[in-house]
């Protein structure tokens, strides 16, 4: 699946250059010229990574980074800061504000894409191809299949595409509670046409798929909060 990268940059020429570079790198760019537009874009769809310019009109990049780190929805989003040459203090401040990395202007498209891929790799608990294993449950990202590794045998687990995406999200974000709204944002991409109880329906289906292997207790209901994925005990 193509990754979405939100570009927050007020200079149109740089924004266009970044968008062009991202498309060439097989990413889907999302564009914002200031804090307000960035918030609107995130509300529409939570990106996989944010490219954040330091100097923005209104809220500075660092204020935005701090705000996103406080918000449950954006807390774990990788952020790469774009800074001007020589702003050493800015970089330290950026890293303190929770920014994952920074690139110094001017930079090449190749350098930028390399940084983006490195940060995305780091921020995910799974492999580059989307493979992930938690206890007996394993997702083969390349094959797009789920396996139950029980008694030394890999048995394919059948499930629908939405259950697959949901499970993949859970497995790469284990032991954290997510509300239905957050799951909608992360798994359904924040589509406004999906109701919260849709999440419950797919959770039920996912549990049913895992039931024959007694792995369904990994999907836990947290009363009054939402759901959590945890290693089987
Ligand atoms: Ca700027």
Image (cartoon, grey):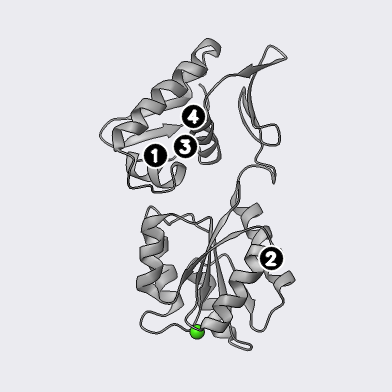
Q: Nearer the viewer, mark 2 or mark 3?
A: 2
Please tell me which residue lies in front, 178 or 10: 10
Mark 2, secondary structure of its residue:
helix
Q: Earlier in the sequence, mark 4 or mark 2?
A: 2
Q: Earlier in the sequence, mark 4 or mark 3?
A: 4
Percent from the top left, x then y, of residue 41? 40, 62
Say if 65 sits above or below 11 in the image. Answer: above
Q: How far apart are the alpha carbons under marks 1 and 3?
A: 7 Å
Could one spot residue 91 in this view of the protein?
no
Percent from the top left, x then y, of residue 214? 51, 13
Q: Which mark is residue 175?
A: 3
Residue at the spot of label 1: 177
Q: How far apart are the alpha carbons under marks 2 and 1?
A: 32 Å
Q: Earlier in the sequence, mark 4 or mark 1?
A: 4
Left or right? Give the position of 169 relative to 58: right
Please tell me which residue lies in front, 1 or 133: 1
Left or right? Give the position of 10 relative to 25: left
Q: Which mark is residue 163?
A: 4
The answer to whether the residues at label 4 and label 1 have Cβ atoms under 8 Å apart is no
Q: How far apart are the alpha carbons under marks 4 and 1?
A: 18 Å
Residue at the spot of label 2: 113
Left or right? Give the position of 196 relative to 219: left
The answer to whether the residues at label 2 and label 1 have Cβ atoms under 8 Å apart is no
Percent from the top left, x then y, of residue 132? 64, 35
* Label 3 CB less than 8 angstroms from ligand 1: no
The answer to whether the residues at label 1 and label 3 have Cβ atoms under 8 Å apart is no
Q: Earlier in the sequence, mark 2 or mark 3?
A: 2
């Amino acid at each position: 699946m193509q990754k979405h990268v939100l570009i927050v940059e007020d200079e149109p020429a740089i924004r266009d250059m970044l968008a062009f570079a991202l498309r060439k790198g097989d990413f889907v760019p999302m564009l914002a010229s200031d804090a307000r537009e960035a918030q609107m874009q995130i509300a529409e769809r939570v990106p996989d990574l944010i490219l954040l310019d330091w100097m923005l009109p209104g809220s500075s990049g660092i204020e935005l980074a701090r705000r996103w780190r406080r918000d449950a929805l954006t807390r774990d989003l990788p952020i790469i800061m774009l800074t001007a040459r020589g702003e050493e203090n800015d970089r330290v401040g950026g890293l303190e504000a929770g920014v994952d990395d920074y690139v110094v202007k001017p930079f090449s498209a190749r350098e930028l894409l390399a940084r983006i891929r490195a940060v995305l790799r780091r921020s995910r608990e799974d492999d580059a191809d989307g493979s992930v294993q938690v206890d007996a449950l394993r997702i083969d990202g390349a094959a797009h299949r789920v396996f139950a590794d029980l008694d030394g045998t890999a048995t394919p687990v059948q499930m629908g595409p939405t259950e697959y995406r949901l499970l993949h999200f859970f497995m790469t974000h284990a032991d954290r509670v997510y509300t239905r709204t957050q799951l909608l944002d992360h798994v359904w991409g924040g589509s406004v046409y999906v109701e919260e109880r849709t999440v419950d329906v797919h959770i039920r289906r996912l549990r049913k798929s895992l039931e024959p292997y007694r792995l369904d207790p990994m999907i836990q209901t947290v009363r009054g909060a939402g759901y959590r994925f945890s290693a089987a005990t």
